[in-house]
Image (cartoon, rainbow, N blue to C red):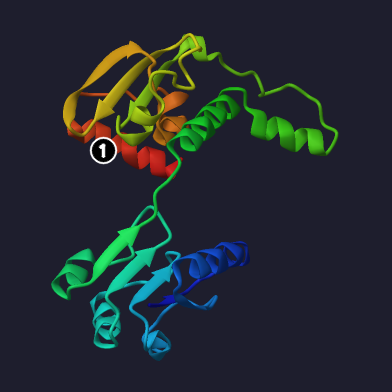
């Protein structure tokens, strides 16, 4: 089997070589994105893997399918850059990457505490020997309500000992499968809770999806 890899980073090359040898596949690599202009570079490949900058619209999907490609892999969690409807109609199999839920949860806690303690501006000041305290007064997590958007894989992976469980705070959790937020002692966390819009500004949760949607947009903008 031949796989054409695009947008390959230097830190990926060693792993690619290991996997190619282990699986017995022929692998071609390039740092370029895949476009209609260089489409012939997929010739002979059954699979194509990209890192997310390649835009798989219907035209590009049709072109790779005509050249014998059967599988498309994106080395990202999101797949917004792939027209999944067109891929299905063309008979292309599409897969994406997974993630480490524990690492995401730990990263979330770090961002929360950085935000609460205003560590980023404090760090900037320290780098220029400015140790003034004005504007750096932080807040304590115990006095706040933590908003948790989504109770899926990250929550499951961090049960029964989630990273926030030792901290004295209450939580409000929301999941798309349950339109009513629930309050309880923190039992898990997701990356979205790190947003300042939820954690610091106290954006209110509502049982209506409309309010949650506004909060979600605030998360992306934060």
**Is 195 in front, or is 157?**
157
Q: Position of residue 116 (x, y in %)?
A: 56, 23
User: What kind of element bears circle 1?
Assistant: helix
Taking the spot 39% from the left edge, 18% from the top edge, the residue there is 160
Asked whether, in this view, residue 106 is left or right of residue 187, the answer is: right
- For residue 37, which quarter of the picture? bottom left
Taking the spot 17% from the left edge, 76% from the top edge, the residue there is 90
The residue identified by callout 1 is 213
Taking the spot 61% from the left edge, 64% from the top edge, the residue there is 14
User: Eyeballing the image, is 84 above or below 45?
Assistant: above
Taking the spot 50% from the left edge, 71% from the top edge, the residue there is 7
Q: Position of residue 84 (x, y in %)?
A: 22, 65
Q: Position of residue 53 (x, y in %)?
A: 44, 68
Q: Residue furthest right?
A: 129
User: Eyeballing the image, is 140 above or below 98?
Assistant: above
Asked whether, in this view, residue 69 is left or right of residue 98, the answer is: left
Please rate how many residues cluster around mark 1, counting C-alpha atoms within 10 Å: few if below 14, some from 14 to 19, many from 20. Answer: few
Q: Quadrant of the N terminus?
A: bottom left
Report the number of discs: 1
User: Eyeballing the image, is 64 above or below 23?
Assistant: below
- For residue 74, which quarter of the picture? bottom left
Q: Position of residue 119 (x, y in %)?
A: 66, 29
- For residue 190, which quarter of the picture? top left
**Is 51 in front, or is 173?**
51
Asked whether, in this view, residue 134 is left or right of residue 170, the answer is: right
Q: Residue furthest left?
A: 89
């Amino acid at each position: 089997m031949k796989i054409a890899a695009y947008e390959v980073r230097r830190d990926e090359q060693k792993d690619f070589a290991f996997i190619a040898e282990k699986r017995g596949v022929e692998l071609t690599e390039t740092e370029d994105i895949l476009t209609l202009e260089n489409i012939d570079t997929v010739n002979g490949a059954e699979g194509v893997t990209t890192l997310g900058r390649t835009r798989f619209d219907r035209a590009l999907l049709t072109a790779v399918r005509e050249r014998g490609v059967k599988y498309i892999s994106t080395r990202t969690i999101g797949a917004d850059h792939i027209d999944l409807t067109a891929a299905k109609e063309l008979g292309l199999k599409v897969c994406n990457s997974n993630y480490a839920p524990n690492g995401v949860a730990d990263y979330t806690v770090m961002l929360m505490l950085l935000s609460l303690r205003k560590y980023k501006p404090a760090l900037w000041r320290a780098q220029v020997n400015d140790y003034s305290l004005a504007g750096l007064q932080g807040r304590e997590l115990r006095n706040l309500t933590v908003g948790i958007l989504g109770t899926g894989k990250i929550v499951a992976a961090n049960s029964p000992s989630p990273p926030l469980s030792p901290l004295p705070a209450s939580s409000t959790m929301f999941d798309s499968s349950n339109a009513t937020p629930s309050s309880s002692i923190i039992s898990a966390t997701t990356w979205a809770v790190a947003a300042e819009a939820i954690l610091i500004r106290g954006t209110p949760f509502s049982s209506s999806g409309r309010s949650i949607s506004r909060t979600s947009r605030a998360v992306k903008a934060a």
